[in-house]
Amino acid sequence: MAQRTEKWVGEGVRRLERCTTLQALALEILRLLSGHLPSAAEDVEPDAYVSAVRAASPRSLREEIDAAIIQLVEQITEDNDSIDEEVAAETLLLASEIFAERERTDIYALLVRILGRPRHYPAAIAIAAGQCAIALGFRGLPAQWRDLHIAAGAPAVPTVMGGLARSDWQQLGDWIVEQRGEAWVERTYINLLPVFTAVHGSERVRELVQRVAPIISSDGANEIARSLSRLGVGTAPTPMMERPVVIDDWEAAIHEYVDDLVIAAPPADYFTSMFTRTAHARRAQQAFLAALKDIVQPWQVDEREAADADVRMLRLIEAFLPAGGFDKAVDTLRRHLDDGGTDARSAAIADAALAVLAKTYRRPPPRTQKDPAFTLCIALLHELARDSVAGPGAIRHLIRLDQANFLDSAFAAAVVNASETIVAAVDAAIEPRNDQQLTWLLNAILDQRSAPAFDAFLGRIREREPYAVALLNRITVPPQSVLIVANTNLREFSERTLADRKRHHAGYKDVVE
Amino acid sequence: MDCVERTRGGAVCATATDCRRRGLRDVLDSCGEPLAEQTRSRTRWLKRKSGLLRQVIDNFYAELHLACSFWRGFIDVLNRGGGDVDALCKAIRKYVRSALFQGPPARIPAGVTMGRATSRKELARHFRRRRYFPDLLSANLAIDEVMRVPVEESRTKWGAYELGSHVMWSTFDPAGGRPFAIANLTSRLLRGRLGLPGRRSRYPVLTLEYELPRWQPAYLPTVAEAYAGNTWLVFFRTSSEEEVDSGFSLTQPHDDLALKHAGMPEVVHAPITGAALSYSPAEID
């Protein structure tokens, strides 16, 4: 079945690929939507078939299909006789699926033309335009939805209600009351309560129910009460929600988070919960990211202020990685190197900025040499490795990116210089496991002939036992005769590890001292 | 073109119900060589276009339960179309939609529960297409809600909603039980036994169980119902005389199940509303 479907969809792709002009492509799509599917068609409605063909098309063709559908919608908008009413409605519903969750002002503009004068179009087209607008997250004006009802009559009631709910919640209540208990309006209102609750929240639904209660029949009121009880919406007022459902001013919300130290939630959790409470989570997130980008652009660490706000801003950047956020973290770390701060404030800021770098590059990009930002990041981390405050974090990140060069004597010396950096290096090399880096680290410690460094190394290894040391099955320490972990018999090794390590430790102390 | 009966010396069939039902072959035999040959040539041409079309044409030839007036119109549509296969398929679809429910009447035990199997996605899209809901989210949430509430409330909620378009295909238990009360029934098995689309789909099947209103007649399915939808059914076969005698047709199971499982009873009728629901909709995994 899957293979047959793919073959069949492939036939549709080839059919669209043969079209040499956008006009021809639009016509072909229209033919498909009219039910002229390839002859081997099975198991699918025309609009679902066109969606499948679009999804299977190469990117260039997909973009052309999108353009052709826009052109078809434009044709429906301009000349409502040229396309069969049913096919036009199918085209609009297809557009709603294709362009859902995407910012397309061009299709909004076309839909507005239909919704702006719905009387000029057949009811099916006007309603489908309304459904498409709702699916695309377009709010419209309350007057447009009211006009749609006047023009298309009862069949438009569900769409008008859905549109008004998005456009102006208050007007939805007004409109329902104006219909004076008309049965179809009441039925639709009751049937849409679950979606109203899911999208607008229980508090607003409770207010709406109270507002329209006078015009609802007694049977309807009973059904609403049962429905609300199932949906978990109480009849008594509930405490105010933590956040408004509609957030127009994301910049204010971001500033509030950064400045209000009482908000303890991590930024990702805090703002994600806000997105989910809005009517359109994805759109809210896009608006938030645009606002964050605008805030980050002029932002820099304010040395006169306490570190908290700067740290929170960097945590916010780490969580959402807005455009320009990486550059700000690099600037912050450069300033840290220039200032040479060693206090707690500097450490906290440097740590947060390093976290941004770590989030940006969790692993090396595919072509490291062609990524100037990555090259810049690695050079900066090498510089930071020598820093007493940011050093451990920088080394940890370098090892995780497999970019620590212990053959560079200056770098090796910087790592071996302090027990904190050694501990960080051991941690980073053990999890995730990097035998090569561990071996190099050990060799660098031996080369430096530093007993405290060796103690720190073995001490950290000991702390990670049994799991970490048990995995150290490939590390040999010169001279060749000394083997820290035997690969061949881990059980035997684990039984005698303490005694062996003590002996080896003593032996190394002799060697290095 | 003349009536088949008249060419045989009988009276002209005034209406479809009066007609002595005949197959396409009989009608072609009676309509004169040039038109018959042209029609046969057109069907041969269509059969060469795809496997599905071969099956469709074979089914048209195998159909014996439609009035000759239907075949006269069909031959006209077939010969009027040009060389565009898609256009011809659309013309056939349009024609058969105008000739629904002309098959033999079905005999269904009184008060039996009828069952329609579909998918949540299809039902949500149907509700949106019929403009009962502004978008798919609303339709899906409404389906969720109706599955949780007592059936009396389901009837109220969906009382005005038609549960299908053009034609509703329905199964039932001739012994009077619930149609989907079958031991160890899975969505895949049910799809297979009913010959539904999505042979390898793992999605649940949504079942709608209802009582056919007394005024609503049901019929044995014919090619007219099978090819009225935008999607032409792959797993459809015409009813046999035995099935006509028993009062219902049998579904054609998917190939991999055909040897192990018999088809389930099936009839067609005009769409009914949610007011006829006997049980709340449910999903079979």
Image (cartoon, grey):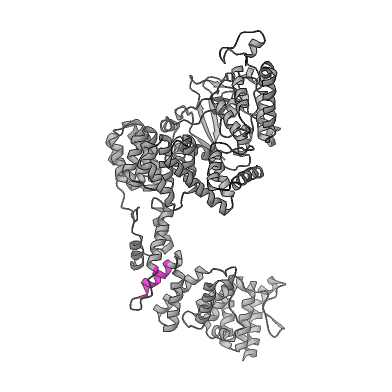
- Left/right placement of residue B49 relative to residue A199 reads right
Report if residue A309 lies within the magenta region. Answer: yes
Q: A138 or A168, which lies in front?
A: A138
Q: Position of residue A314 (x, y in %)?
A: 42, 70
Q: Is residue B238 above or below residue A463?
A: above
Q: Is residue B37 above or below residue B202?
A: above
- Left/right placement of residue B145 relative to residue A398 reads left
- Magenta extent: A296-316
Report if residue A81 lies within the magenta region. Answer: no
Q: Position of residue A347 (x, y in %)?
A: 43, 78
In the rendered view of the protein, which quadrant contains the C terminus of chain A? bottom right
In the rendered view of the protein, which quadrant contains the N terminus of chain A? top right
| Quarter residue A249 falls in | bottom left
Q: A361 or B176, which lies in front?
A: A361
Residue lying furthest bottom:
A513
Q: Position of residue A55 (x, y in %)?
A: 56, 49
Whether residue B46 is visible to the viewer of this picture, yes or no, is yes
Q: What is the count of numbered marks?
A: 0
